[in-house]
Amino acid sequence: MFKHYTMNQVILPLDLEIKLQENDIAYAVNDVVESIPDEAFVNFLRDTGCPAYHPRMMMKIILCAYTQSVFSGRKIEGLLKDSVRMMWLSQGYEPSYRTINRFRVHPEVKELLRQCFVQFRCQLVQEKLIDEEAIFIDGTKIEANANKFTFVWRKSIEKYSASLVEKSNQMYDELLEKEVIPEIERESLDELSIEELEKIVEKLDEKVEEYDKKIEVSEDVSERKQLRSERKEPKQYQKQFKDYLARKEKYQNDMEIFGKRNSYSKTDHDATFMRMKDDYMKNGQLKAGYNVQVATEGQYALAYDVFPNPTDTRTFIPFLDKIEKGFFELPPYIVADAGYGSEQNYEDVIENRKRTPLITYNHYRKEKKKKYQNDAFNLANWEYNKEEDSFICPNNKTLSFRYLSNRTDKYGFTRTFKVYECENCSGCPLRSLCTKSKEGNNRKVYYNEKWEQQKEYIREKLSNKETGEIYGKRKIDVEPVFGFLKANLCFHRFSVRGKDKVENELGFAFMAVNLRKYIAMNGGQTIKSENSPKKNGSNHLFLMIGTIFQLFWLVMSQPLLTYL
């Protein structure tokens, strides 16, 4: 005996919500998108053309697909036909993969994602899942949607550009020496600009055209042969300068794309070639990627940003600016690893933002080792005379203060060093161990007083019990977010190209990580929202079922009443 099964019968109820479990992630997706204020969707309205799909619905289906580790537009379209939760979120609509892809890279979606993170964080604060005491910042590199072998390097472009300048100047001098073309006005004698190369090509075109007319007019075979021979040299110069002009334009365009970077990908101009941890070839191969920065608390991603430069040091200040501008006010403590420890970053957090940085520096661990503390030639272990402002070296020689030295890096930040010089290093038995300077030169020491004070401040904060415990949470707070993103969500490579589009996709990915963790940690509770359909009229299914059975009973009882 089998259970009743037929394909020719309508199954009630028709609403797919009854098919979902109480702790289904679709409810969390629905609630977090419904929490976005209506004002955020105004820019999607249009007066002409076919009515568009509601952006709330599009946000829900893309976000839900990302929670299921589905990132392809075509696969999301397939889920709309197969997945019950996707059918419920879309309410029967089936947008094509083109519509899905166009929506998730739309510039206005960035604001919707920002609102999602703001509302989600407010809910975490209300439920006391985070205490707003500190944020934990870290970065990771994610591969771009670009070919591995489409690299362009700044050093190569600079080398070829310099060679082009030299050859074009040399060839222009040859043209003037041979009187092929008249001299042109130049802005600089160092190199020929694009406009000047265009003028040279124009003059050569006129010269070649002049020879062409003479050849057409002449009827003497020997004369025509002579003219063709004379025309050969201007045509060669013409071809060469056209090549120079095309290369000059290309090199200038390359330098504009580089900006402050050292490389870019031809497939995705915003991507930079970086060294990835997941190196399949095990040979240190560089891949096009983005430096992803995230701020977390309670293992939830609260803010994020994307940078094209591979080092974390330069991303710290702009990331904090973005957090304050678009996400939330910075808490009292900002925690990060040694990759963010620099004089400029400490100065920004302490003096400009009035916060406490719990950020180590590069030699923080090394300074605690006995080898470092027992090194007699290390400046940190030398005796310092505060009254005379001098150091005493291992050979009991005095290094007195000489002058101040200012060093400005390529990013414009200036560091001030106090320079100390030994009174006399000649004949010192420890000279070879103390300095590598030439014979006759004394040992010089560059001492950054501000940097040393900052390091002492950090050591004091990290040795304190309360702040030390906060820093100790860093690894168990921010690192798992990247683990969830790459291992659980399987997000290893972007699906879109361009920094703005990548930032949108990253927002969907991090919010998907947040929702999956929230559902797992809170036993299926969903995010509370005033606009949530589960809160407003949550018994609509049971009312609908009751109404249907009441109508069914009236229809079935009608013949009986007539008979009576």
Image (spheres, rainbow, N blue to C red):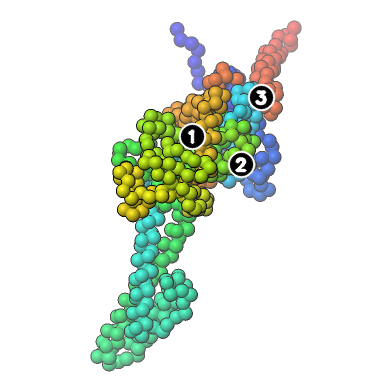
| Rendered location of residue 158, percent (x, y) | 39, 60
Residue 2: percent from the left, percent from the top? 46, 10
CA separation, marks 3 and 2? 31 Å
In the visual, does 432 lie left or right of 87? left
Q: Position of residue 17 (x, y in %)?
A: 59, 22
* Nearer-the-camera pick, 559 or 507: 507
Q: Residue drawn at (45%, 29%), measured in percent from left and top? A: 483
Please say whether residue 387 is visible from this viewpoint: yes
Image quadrant in which you'd find residue 248: bottom left
Q: Which mark is residue 126?
A: 3
Point out the tag, 3 or 2, that comes first from the N-terminus. Answer: 3
Badge 2 marks a residue whose secondary structure is helix
Question: Residue 351 has which mark?
Answer: 2
Q: Residues within 10 Å of mark 2 (few under 14, many from 20)?
A: few
- Give the class, few, some or many, for how many residues have Cα within 10 Å of label 1's Cα (few <14, many ≥20): many
- In percent of the image, x 50 and y 45: which residue is there? 389
Q: CA distance from mark 1 to mark 3?
A: 32 Å
205 versus 385 height, above or below = below
Image quadrant occupied by the N terminus = top left
The numbered dot on residue 360 is 1
Residue at 24% x, 90% y: name it.
Answer: 222
